[in-house]
Image (tube, helix red, strand yellow):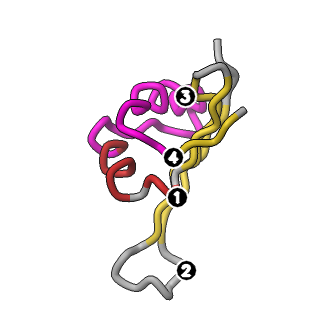
């Protein structure tokens, strides 16, 4: 397994993976994941197995007050490559 930051190239795979978490996890839109990849990739690691996304953490922190660690969001999913 290798860990890499969320990238635009992996958005489709992440959406598919998040969909496996239903009904507890709801996949976001392509534009949401594009935003996460463009602005928050360092806090959105992907677990890669056999060149497929096997897990993802989508996390970001409010930018207006970096000292406030209570605001932000986390979205997690894990699965096995098919």
- Secondary-structure class at tag 4: strand
In this picture, is 74 found above or below 79? below
Question: Is the C-beta separation of discs 4 and 3 under 8 Å?
Answer: no
Quadrant including the N terminus = top right
Residue ID at (58%, 22%) = 52
Q: Nearer the viewer, mark 3 or mark 1?
A: 1
- Secondary-structure class at tag 3: helix
Pinpoint residue 56: horizontal percent, then vertical percent: 58, 41
Residue ID at (66%, 34%) = 78
Separation of marks 1 and 4 at Cα, in angstroms: 7 Å
Mark nearer the N terminus (4 vs 3): 4
Please rate how many residues cluster around mark 1, counting C-alpha atoms within 10 Å: few if below 14, some from 14 to 19, many from 20.
Answer: some
Q: Which residues are magenta?
A: 5-32
Residue ID at (50%, 61%) = 73
Mark nearer the N terminus (1 vs 4): 4
Residue ID at (38%, 51%) = 36
In this picture, is 34 found above or below 15? below
Please rate how many residues cluster around mark 3, counting C-alpha atoms within 10 Å: few if below 14, some from 14 to 19, many from 20.
Answer: many
Which residue corresponds to mark 2? Answer: 69
Closer to us: 72 or 5: 5
Mark nearer the N terminus (2 vs 1): 1
- As for residue 13 lying within the magenta part, the answer is yes
Q: Please identify the residue farthest to the top as the structure is shown.
A: 82
Which residue corresponds to mark 4? Answer: 5
Separation of marks 3 and 2 at Cα, in angstroms: 27 Å
Separation of marks 2 and 1 at Cα, in angstroms: 14 Å
Pinpoint residue 42: horizontal percent, then vertical percent: 49, 57
In this picture, is 62 found above or below 57? below
Q: Nearer the viewer, mark 1 or mark 4?
A: 4
């Amino acid at each position: 397994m290798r860990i890499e930051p969320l990238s635009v190239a992996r958005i489709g795979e992440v959406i598919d993976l998040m969909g496996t978490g239903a009904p507890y996890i709801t996949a976001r839109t392509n534009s949401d994941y594009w935003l996460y990849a463009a602005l928050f990739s360092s806090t959105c690691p992907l677990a890669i197995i056999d060149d497929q996304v096997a897990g993802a953490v989508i996390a970001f922190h409010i930018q207006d007050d970096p000292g406030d660690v209570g605001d932000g969001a986390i979205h997690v999913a894990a699965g096995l490559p098919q």
